[in-house]
Image: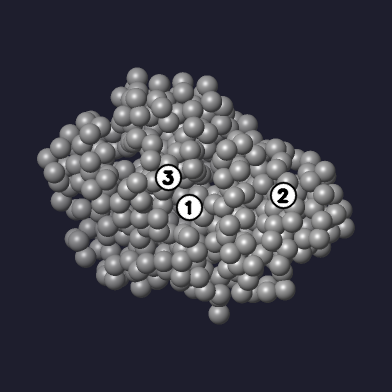
Amino acid sequence: MSRIRNTRRGVLAAVAASIAALALVACSSGPAATDPTDDGGSGVEGDVIALSGADADNLGGDLTIPVGINVALSGQGAYFGEVMVQGAQLAADQIKAAGGPDFQLSVKDHKSGDAQAGVQTTREFAQEGVRMALYSYIAVLGSALQPIAQYEILSLDGGGGTQEFGKGQPFFYGTRALPPNDTFAGTAQYIASAMPEVTKVAMIIGDTGAENTQDSIDKATAELEGSGIEIVATEVVTYGGTDFTSAINKIIASDAQLIVEAQYGTDGGYFLKQLRAAGSDLPVIGTEFIPDVAEIAGSAADGFMFSLDYFDAANPSNQWAQYLVDTAAEEYPETTVDFYFANYYQDMFKLWTVVQRVLANGGDVNNPDDLLAAFESDLTFPSVYGGTMDDLHGEESIDAVSHSLSARDMGVFLWDGENVTRLATYGIGGVDFSLAE
């Protein structure tokens, strides 16, 4: 697998190396730390088994298992796809080295959300005998959900979660907090707590389909109004766009005191650059931050706040997270370990957990019913998010009805041009909100 072309090396280094040292507050605590090699292993084997909470009696080392990876390798989302594949491959390599299955990754390109590609690649997985897969783009913006159910492929989407239209779909689970919906409660509480003078905001949101976009607008409106904040302007813009001049002019003409920005990928970089070029100094709180945003926007990104389940690579929150950062730096030295890398890394370990449970129950790892039953038997999994450095790992949970994450560490952060600093901590739904000390 080729490494990401590093035209943004300076920004990547700043993001990765200069993130402020601020302890993360866990949504839930993980198990107490012990020596990772206490199980009798050593090196990678001992570390991975202990850190990931693996069942040492049912590792599945005699198995070769195909795993589908359906991500964007071309088009506007190609950056995400390559990072996701790297995270998944690092996990597969570590799992095999620790005595687990030989997970053979079948990597497909859905061309940044192309519906036909989503259906075709899922069909190809079925033809290859794939029974477990990692997807992105909310199972290719819905097109792959029906074939996933038809072919009974246990599928996780750590890129966009389930969104509303993917909730409760058979064999499909979201393993990322819903962007942007799960961020609004924490964002509203942050504005009310840290910026009480702000009572009117504008919203700019990328169009991910009329129903999905309106649902996000309604969610934002409810959460913000609940904190005494009015949305005075709403601009729906093209997802993947680069020219936001019209929307910016309308926002500036409103009496908004702050902008809630719900865009994805590089869109935020172009928006920030054009907003500042238009002469506006309105503060902005976004729902995503990747190194490319800072590179595109340059100094216009200074002061940008963002609210999400951000993986803080420079300040890992538990021992497994630290292990991920350290080993990723060795394997992919030019890649910043962002939340996409971290999500697809730990989602491979979720699949390994499923295999361990099937083996412990005397089941068949090629039987989709056995795989699904094992997955659903306990929807709390070890995580590189949350916990403290006294813990081997954090924990996160999936809701049995919605198939979306119900618990994960989230926060509000600030990029100042050099450092990322945590401003607040909260969980999904805004639970346990607190300002950083």
Residue type pointed to by label 2: Thr
- Of label 1 and label 2, which has the lower sequence position? 1
Specify the label residue 174 is tagged with.
3
Residue type pointed to by label 3: Gly
Q: In front of the other: label 1 or label 2?
A: 2
Q: In the drawing, does residue 376 fall left or right of residue 359?
A: right
The crowd level at tag 3 (other Cα within 10 Å; few <14, some 14-19, many 20+) is many
Q: Where 388 falls versus 357 (above or below)? A: below
Circle 2 residue: 234
Q: Position of residue 240 (x, y in %)?
A: 68, 38
Specify the label residue 177 is tagged with.
1
Q: Given the current orientation, which residue lies at the most extreme bottom position?
A: 437
Q: Position of residue 7 (x, y in %)?
A: 68, 45
Residue type pointed to by label 1: Ala
Is 263 in front, or is 58?
Answer: 263
Q: Quadrant of residue 253?
A: bottom right
Q: Where 40 falls versus 176 (above or below)? A: below
